[in-house]
Image: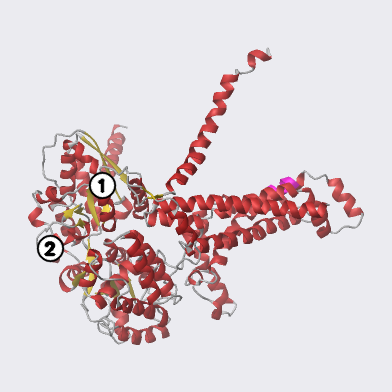
Amino acid sequence: MLQTIKPKGKTIFWYLFIPVAMFVFTVFVPLVTALVFSFFEWKGGPNKIFNGLANYIQLYNDSTFWQAFGHNIYLVVACIIGQIGIAFILVMMINSRLVKFKSIHRTFGFFPSTIAAVCIGLIWNMIYHSKYGILNWFLKLIGRADLTQPWLSNSKLVMLLVTIPLIWQYIGYYMVILISAIASISTEIFESAEIDGANGFQQAVYITMPLIKNTLLVCITLCIAGNMKAFDNIYVMTAGGPGNASMVMAMYGYQVSFGQSNMGYGSCISVAIFVLSLLVIGGSQFLINKLTAEKEA
Amino acid sequence: MKKRSILCIAMAAVMAASLVVPAFAAVDVAESDLAYAGDLNVMHFSTSEESEGNGGSDGFRTVLAAWNEAHPDINLVENVLANAEYKTQIATLAAAGDLPDVFLLQGMNTKQWAEQGLIMDLTDIIAASPYYDDYAQNYFTPFKVGDSIYGYPVLTGGTCTVVIYDKAMWQEAGFDSFPTTWEEVEEASAYFSEQGIDTIAFGNGGKWQANSCFLSTLGNRYTGPDWFQSLIDKSGAAFTDEAFVKALEETRYLFCDTDIFNDDYNAVTNEDAREYYISGDAAAFIGGNWDESYIWAALKDDDPEKFDNIGFAVLPQPADAEFAPDSQNIGLGYAVAFNSALADDPDKLAAAIDFAQEVTGPAFSSYVAENYALGGLTDAGEVDLSAFDQITADFYNWSYVDTEKCEIYDSYINSAVWDVVNTDLQTLMNGETTAEEVAANAQAAYEANY
């Protein structure tokens, strides 16, 4: 009976082949072609001239690219602290027995991450708007009109200002992941800790965090990967400006490829984003594993 | 029951008619006997939203529809995108060597795409056009490489730099007309600042506006037209030349060191800035003809008093500038161009030529002249301004009669250069870099990419 229900190996192979083929076509092929194009001077059109490592040498000396890379690192650090850190604190608060309507908190917390990034950018543009924005309105309301300014024109503050919406948007996303991880911890452990006199902070640091370490690692990896390719929110809010003050790597690659019609160098930037992202993710995992291993030892 | 049915049918017919009857009379395209039958791919950015109040887009869509109707054997396959998306997609298709049969070519891409063999040389085809004698020859300049022409300039010839001001507000400030020098504008800004009003609204959030709608005209006041022609021809001029650096310095001074402009000029776009003018938060606005048509439509019915007070002016003249105080940059930024592969199919090419001739020909020009008081590539004769409101008539005279014309910078050279300039201009206007640094970066990009 089982033999008749069980599909043939060939059938299983072809069913599994479809997603693998799609993955190869949409991820692997563009990556390889970008790598190939990165060795050419290609200003659009059919004419490509092989120029060896010239694009990579240009990239090495391109201060705008490295400035953009610095901005991505800023985003990564700020978002790990802001997104995962705040999400963890909120989860601990929601899990408290004192909090009512937990599902409502979860739903509203998750809601921003369902909104399109372009809409988030527009919403926060309105908040920061110099004349009609709620931020300047509030400052005037509390008698601090001297602090009002055209926020997104301020080169020194603009990275922080474009990071805040990113943090706000994804707190709920990490909350949901962390809630499910914490739900798998036996309540008996927390009850025992409570009997032993552990307060909320001690329970969070000495019980919850070690037991959801792998989930936290996944969250950090997702956070790094997401912020190394940040584009849409920032593009809507500042388009990388003023000047290059909020330029990030993906936007710079887009600008070079399509704004300047320099596809060869744009491909080189794409390859660099991929390599640098792998290095940052790998490096952070190595660091975390080393730190936690030392602690456990 | 029968009466009710008849009534329903009659109402439905009236509703359907109201949907299909256009705001203006339809146009007739020239009859032609084309052998081609099949698909003709056309890509453009005259969306239905864009065409509302925009004469060029409305005219293009109207003539395109008329041509489509007149050639039932040809299936016009349209790919219509908003302008920003259009620019990205057409650049992608060009990079892939997969341009549509017929599309709109931006002036600054002409040289690069012609060198790549992507676009067809139309010099002889245009010379053979039945409307050739009525073409405004100067509109072809951005689409020329040497003596070869690569496109039929399309849509309407409109300014990229017009000062739109509220006559009543400026009269209250003590000016019967818009100041002709920046010193006078600075004086006025003291008055407007006291009132809590911006003197001039400007939006450079998209980065291109400062180049297209400000520097292009201001630069001409310092350098004169020969300098830019020399830059196009690569015959000696450089971005680092003293006159151009002075223009950059003046730009930095006006935006950074005076209170003339709204303080968020680098954070808002021209679409936001023109709302400052419409709402009365600014006494004037600097933008292009597309902004004028928006302001015209926004004020005409909603605020007739403010509408009647609309005035037009050229950029004021800087004290140390030597050239053309009445100049404004005007032209046709796009041309109908063909994929060079069309040469392999003579019948299809003939259809494309006929299409291009009509959407830039007398049918288009008459339509935009009669309905919008605008001009295109083909001369439509004298426009009867008595049929229009005073503001439309004033803008026509300002655009085509009373002012001196100069070139639109980013219709020439190429995007790699202007992208660098535009990014640096934002920093310059924020006072975070010097005119010399901007000029040096621009020259480096020019030498590397042009």
Q: Are marks 1 and 2 on the same chain?
A: yes
Q: How crowded is mark 2: few (under 14 residues within 10 Å), some or many (20 or more)?
A: some
- Can residue A49 be seen? yes
Image quarter hosting the N terminus of chain A: top right
Name the residue at 54% across, 81% down: A146
Q: In the drawing, what numbered circle is on residue B117? A: 1
Tell me where the magenta segment starts and ends, as one range: A176-181
Left or right: A4 in relation to A229: right
Q: Nearer the viewer, residue B82 or B105?
A: B105
In which chain is the residue bearing label 2?
B
Q: How crowded is mark 1: few (under 14 residues within 10 Å), some or many (20 or more)?
A: some
Find out whether residue B298 is within the magenta segment.
no
Q: Distance between the residues labelled 1 and 2?
A: 39 Å
| Percent coordinates x, y for residue A239 in the rendering | 45, 61
> How many circles with numbers are drawn on the protein?
2
Q: Is the magenta stretch mostly helix, strand or loop?
A: helix
Among the 4 quarters of the image, the one containing residue B396:
bottom left
In which chain is the residue bearing label 1?
B
Q: Report the amino acid beneath label 1.
A: Gly
Considering the numbered disc 1 on the image, is that residue within a helix, a strand or a loop? loop
Q: Which of B284 and B401 is in front in this view?
A: B401
Work out whether mark 1 precedes mark 2 in sequence or the reverse, and give the earlier one: 1
Please give the residue where the numbered disc 2 appears in the rendered image. B383
Q: In the drawing, what numbered circle is on residue A50? A: none
Q: Work out whether A190 lies above or below B231.
A: above
Among the 4 quarters of the image, the one containing residue B164:
bottom left
| Percent coordinates x, y for residue B299 in the rendering | 31, 67
Find out whether residue A178 is within the magenta segment.
yes
| Percent coordinates x, y for residue B23 in the rendering | 23, 52
- Can residue B281 be seen? no
